[in-house]
Amino acid sequence: MKLIQTILSGDPNFRFWPKPGEAQPKAFIRLNDGQTLLQKAFLRGHHLIGLTEVLTVTNRELFFSSEDEYREVNARTVPTNFILEPVGRGTAAALIAAALQVAQTHGGDALMLVLPADHLIERQDVFEAAMAQAFSMAEQGQWVALGVKPTGPETAYDYFELKDQRVTRLHTQPDLAQAKVMAASGHHVWNTGIYCVSAATLLGQASAHAPELVAAVQNCLQHSRASSGRGVSQLVLDASTFGLLPHVSIEEAVLQASSQVALVTCDMAWSDIGQWAELGELTMPDAQGNRSHGTVMLDGSSNCTVQAQGRPVGVVGVDNLLVVDTPDAILVADKQYAPKLGSLLAQLRSQGSAYQSANVVHRSWGSYHLIHESPGFKIRSLHIKPGASLSLQLHEHRSEHWVVISGLAHIATGDQDIVMTPNRSAYIAAGQKHRLYNPGQMPCTLIEVQSGSYLGEEDVVRFEEKLLA
């Protein structure tokens, strides 16, 4: 049996504002144990029998950060491959593209274990036992879904309706009155979005119920670019054809109409961590019911959830508040209103606020951290991996000043070729070709000061491109 762990990643985390939305999806939120939800999803199938590769469908802007996250936890060096979307078009297009890729690479009999990247499962042993049952059913041509018994009337979840333990209907995100009835019925379970299905069965069901979508995805793949390097393969989906696809979930496009859905129900302590209150519950409360992370000072307060990042946060004499502090923005809300962040984000969009910003941006050579930006200048720290190099390039509208903080930096320009040690600096004039390389065995950190009339990322002319995406 070939098992392809298929991770769906990249959904914006707008319910977790002010954490960056599209720039840093919910899957990249780091929990108190030091692992991100994406890393936990990666490890979820790490010890399952037959695991052949991990295939991730994500936004192309998240490729390097995803690769870095996997590298930290991939002790078994399981092959990792990526399908990179130019824009999100829902899980239907993502899974059809994944199934086409799996069928081409591993054959139609290969099983796909579909895992959302941003869920939490606390009982791994129960999950693995359920998977053993699901694999056997999937090999018989069934589309197997994992379900959990409802603990309350959740309107954000889909519900499978059962009769004699067989799925008769899928209800997608019911209203509160319907959710109350289904949660109490004993004949409905939540759909976790975790599936086990062969590539052939997925494509057969999608062709039966959404043939136009399958044809459109096939056309997109014919125009898409495949590449590989550093032990990683990727398929960069064609933007012009993929952008025309409808935004639809696999549940709406296929599963609502399918009669081949089988169900495995288990108590694996599952949560999709849909809002700040649920994330806060992962932290042990103090005697007053407060849950805090970071440098937090509490006095005369109770039942508060406080997230501090990089600076102290003081909370005095309040009750039932949610306080989230980030370098970009601060959220203060009564917990009962925390799920209503949509209206707040609408205001930010209308004001043109950079609510999608992310202080850390990952690239093939490492990452950079935006420290400060004002008209005419920008300050960043660059972190370059050992042996990594930025492409040969120039900037037309800005100059750059570099100061090495740690490690070694090899800087090559038209008139200099030097290796700089800590506390040395270099100046790159606008219009000057240059390359930055780390020749050492340790990461290199530099402080970069950009100055000029235009400081956007588009002001770069590359003369050779080593990046995969």
Image: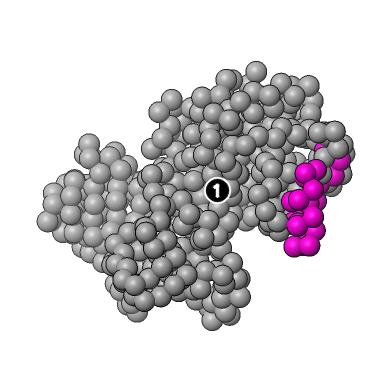
| Residue span colored magenta | 167-188
How many residues crowd around disc 1 within 10 Å: few (fewer than 14), some, or many (20 or more)?
many
Q: Amino acid at mark 1?
A: Asp
Verify whether residue 169 appears in magenta: yes
Q: Which structural element holds mark 1?
A: loop
> Residue 152, can we see it?
yes
Verify whether residue 426 appears in magenta: no
Q: What percent of the width, then of the height, locates residue 370?
A: 34, 64
Q: What percent of the width, then of the height, locates residue 258?
A: 85, 40
Q: Is residue 130 left or right of residue 462?
A: right
Q: What percent of the width, then of the height, locates residue 420?
A: 15, 50
| View extreme (top): residue | 1
- Does residue 466 sit above or below 103 in this rendering? below
- Does residue 10 sit above or below 201 in this rendering? below
Could you tell me which residue is drawn at 56 percent across and 75 percent down? Answer: 344
Q: What percent of the width, then of the height, locates residue 386?
A: 28, 40
In the rendered image, which quarter contains the N terminus?
top right
Q: Is residue 212 left or right of residue 246?
A: right
Could you tell me which residue is drawn at 70 percent across and 56 percent down? Answer: 153
> Residue 250, can we see it?
no
Could you tell me which residue is drawn at 43 percent across and 32 percent down? Answer: 74
Q: Nearer the viewer, residue 22 or 285?
A: 285
Instruction: Give the image's coloring scheme.
Output: one colour
Q: Nearer the viewer, residue 64 or 419?
A: 64
- The residue identified by callout 1 is 118
- Does residue 458 sit above or below 145 in this rendering? below
Q: Nearer the viewer, residue 391 or 407?
A: 407
| View extreme (front): residue | 287
